[in-house]
Image: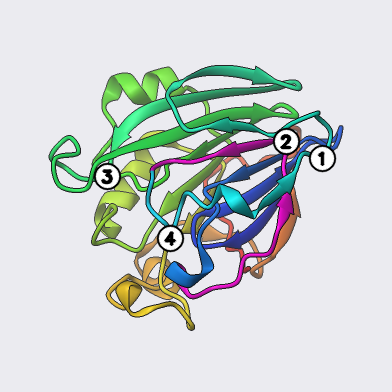
Amino acid sequence: MEITYLGHACFKLKSKEGMILLMDPFKSENVGLPLVKETADIVTVSHDHDDHNAVEVVSGPATRSNTFLIDKEGEYEIGGVEITAFRTFHDKAEGANLGKNLSIALRMDGVNVLHLGDLGHELSESQIEKIGSVDVLMVGIGGGTTLELDEVMELIKDVQPSYVIPMHYKVPGMTEIYASKHTLQEFLDKSKFVVAGEPVHKIKIDANSLPDDTQILTMNA
C-alpha cells in the first residue's frame, strides 16, 4: 500500500491493484494550503467542515465506474478494501459543541489503517477492542478542537500502532483560524517514541515489514 500525504488531515492511499482512496480532502481557501484535483475510487469524509469535506476536488474514479463516498457510519467492502466507519465526536460533550465525527478503520493490502478525523475525546475500551490491530494510526495533534498532546500520547499507548502519522497541525501558510494549533515539532518534543527517519511525502507500507515497536512517521505535503 502506498500512502501520500496531501496536507492537513488529507491522505491518498493506493493499493497494489491501483485502487485509490482519498481521506478528508479540504477546501484550500479555508485551510490556506493547496490541494489539486485528484482521482479517487473511494472518498471518506469524517465530518462536514470545510477542512475535511471538499469532495469537489475529486475529478473522477481511477479504477471503478464511479467514486464511492463514505460519510456515514457502516461497514463497506469496495474493490478488496474493507472499511469500517464508526461514529465518534468532535468534542468531549458527545458532539454538543462541535458536532459528530466519523473515524475510519480500513484494511488495504493486508495493512490496517485508522484515520481518526477530528476526534475530540478518548476512545472507549470497547471501541479500541473492536478496532483491533492497527498498523498505521493517523491522528490529529493540533489540539484545541481535537485531542491535546497528552491525550494523543495516551491514545497511542492504548492503540499500540506500528506507525503513527501526525496530522491536523499548524504549518506555515495556513489561515488565521489555525494559528493556535500545535506544531509538529511540539508533538515530537513531547513524544518518547522513535521517529522513523526523515519526513517523506509518499511511502509504501508492507504488512510483512512493520516495526515491532511504535514509531512516528512524519510526512510532508
Residue 163 image point, x, y percent: 56, 47
Using the numbered discs, state the Cα–Cα distance from disc 4 to disc 2 in whole angstroms. 24 Å
State the quadrant of the N terminus: top right
Query: Mark 1 and mark 2 in contact (Cβ < 8 Å)?
Result: yes
Three-letter amino acid code of the residue under disc 2: Asp
Question: At 27% from the left edge and 44% from the top edge, which residue is drawn?
Answer: 90
Using the numbered discs, state the Cα–Cα distance from disc 1 to disc 3 in whole angstroms. 31 Å
User: Which region shows up in magenta?
Assistant: 31-47
Question: At 47% from the left edge and 77% from the top edge, which residue is drawn?
Answer: 171
Looking at the picture, the colour scheme in use is rainbow
Residue at which label 3 appears: 90
Residue nearest the observer in this picture, 74 or 115 = 74
Q: Residue furthest bottom?
A: 172
Residue 168 is labelled as 4
State the quadrant of the C terminus: bottom right
Residue nearest the observer in this picture, 67 or 121 = 67
